[in-house]
Amino acid sequence: MVSVTVGLTPDEALALAQFVKRSLFDTYREFANDEEEARLILAAVDNLREGLAAESFTPPMKSPLAAPSQPPRRKRRMGSSP
């Protein structure tokens, strides 16, 4: 096991937590030499995510129950048809 200690500002830690939350396996696979290396990257990023969460840097998740945001309604001009 290798332990890595880094110093991050709170903003950097939150930004990194957001990045690892949004990262997908396809991203790792694109930059890895092969599938095995991509899985190793995924495992390392999962450990990083857990470390950030242990320090209370867990980005908020959008609730799946939240209502989808609605685009603003366009105002109709007087005299124009709908």
Image: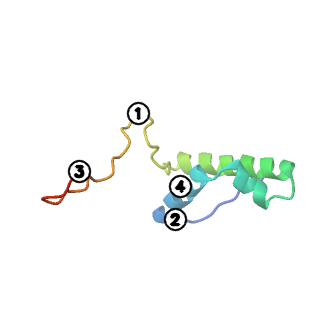
Q: Earlier in the sequence, mark 4 or mark 3?
A: 4
Residue 55 coordinates in the image, percent (x, y): 52, 50
Disc 2 is placed on an element classified as: helix
Disc 1 vs disc 2: which is toward the camera? 1
Decide which of 81, 18 is in the foreground and name it: 81
Residue 17 coordinates in the image, percent (x, y): 55, 54
Residue labelled with disc 3? 82
Q: Earlier in the sequence, mark 1 or mark 3?
A: 1
Amino acid type, callout 3: Pro
Report the residue that reaches farthest toward the left: 78
| 17 sits to left or right of 74 | right
Disc on res. 12: 2
Q: Earlier in the sequence, mark 1 or mark 2?
A: 2
Residue labelled with disc 4? 18
- Label 3 packing within 10 angstroms: few (<14), some (14-19), many (20+): few
Residue 36 coordinates in the image, percent (x, y): 86, 48
Residue at 53%, 55% in the rendered image: 18
How many numbered marks appear?
4
Amino acid type, callout 4: Gln
Residue labelled with disc 1? 65
Amino acid type, callout 2: Glu
Residue at 86%, 58% in the rendered image: 33
